[in-house]
Amino acid sequence: MRIVVLTGAGISAESGLPTFRDADGLWEGHDPMTVATPEAYDDDPDLVHRFYDERRAALGRVRPNAAHVALARLEEALGDDLYLVTQNIDDLHERGGSRRVHHMHGRLRAAWCTTCDHRASWHGPLRDRPPCPACERPTLRPDVVWFGEVPHGMDDIERELWECDLFVSIGTSGLVYPAAAFVHYAVGNGKRTLELNLDASGTSGDVHESRRGPATELVPAWVDELLSGAGVTS
Ligand code: BJW
């Protein structure tokens, strides 16, 4: 069985990383949506750099949780039959043991030079405008996908959705496109769909099955169930 798993901020919430749209999802009184656009970056680059520098620094204080680890266990068992695509820019899937992770909205620990297009692994702050390692211009920005920009690897995701048997979305509000449309694409192409989320999401009504609870409980239980051969119930 080929499975596509889509994860969102909810899977990292119990590791201590705030989500975007839950009650504690605001940062210093700013709606993250107002800093996640190219226009916001043009208007106030210091604010946007501070937002991402803080989040990059926070990665050093958090650890993967049982949900990340369970998905790594699933990868171990299924190999290439698991395709893990995340909207998260944290690295908790990798640190939880997953080896193949598609970061459709980019990565916090990466920088992108808007002058020469160079992409570099980046662990420190960007607000002091360090020089690009390739062209030395001070034009590095977080290598993340903001509103109005095109998510990474859409062709690969579309192919995997077409080829899978089961699509599972975990801890995402289903409000941001194109990720929110994956479930519709899957259902429209006859795939089985499952949602694991603390609360109802924008796409709960569209999936075959929706389970409610914290990711650290639901994800390991689902992986156990799948690997014991019980599969997904309707
Ligand atoms: C738990 C839990 C626990 C909590 N256990 N669960 C079609 C219609 C309408 C609009 C559009 C459309 N197509 C495009 C748009 C415009 C726009 C868009 O979607 N706007 C909406 C606001 C309507 N989209 C775009 O601009 C995208 N680009 C695009 O479409 O390009 C065109 C194109 C596409 C494809 C091919 C060719 C061209 C780009 C979107 C980029 C989004 N970027 C951000 C910031 C990234 C960097 C950063 O992290 O700062 O991505 S915004 C933000 O939202 C971030 C997230 O990845 C994303 C999704 O958030 P997520 O993960 O769902 O988090 P929350 O907080 O919303 O939800 C948390 C969930 O967890 C909740 O459900 C909780 O219940 C749950 N939860 N604790 C389990 N313990």
Image: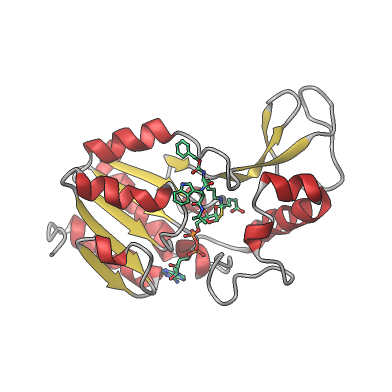
Q: What colour scheme was applied to this rendering of the protein?
A: secondary structure
Q: Pinpoint residue 60: horizontal percent, then vertical percent.
A: 66, 57
Who is closer to the viewer here, 188 or 126? 188
58 to 218, vertically: above or below = above
Check the image and name the residue furthest to the right. 128
Q: Is residue 234 left or right of residue 63?
A: left
- Let me know if residue 223 appears in the view: no
Q: Quadrant of residue 68?
A: bottom left
41 to 162, vertically: above or below = below
5 to 212, vertically: above or below = above
Q: Residue at x 49, y 47 (%)?
A: 94
Q: Quadrant of residue 139?
A: top right
Quadrant for the N terminus in the image: top left
- Let me know if residue 173 appears in the view: yes
Q: Residue at x 21, y 46 (%)?
A: 188
Q: Residue at x 32, y 69 (%)?
A: 218
Who is closer to the viewer here, 231 or 137? 137
Who is closer to the viewer here, 77 or 120? 120
Q: Is residue 10 left or right of residue 136?
A: left
115 to 57, vertically: above or below = above
Q: Is residue 26 left or right of residue 84?
A: right
Quadrant for the C terminus in the image: bottom left
Q: Pinpoint residue 10: horizontal percent, then vertical percent.
A: 46, 65
Q: Pinpoint residue 54: horizontal percent, then vertical percent.
A: 73, 59
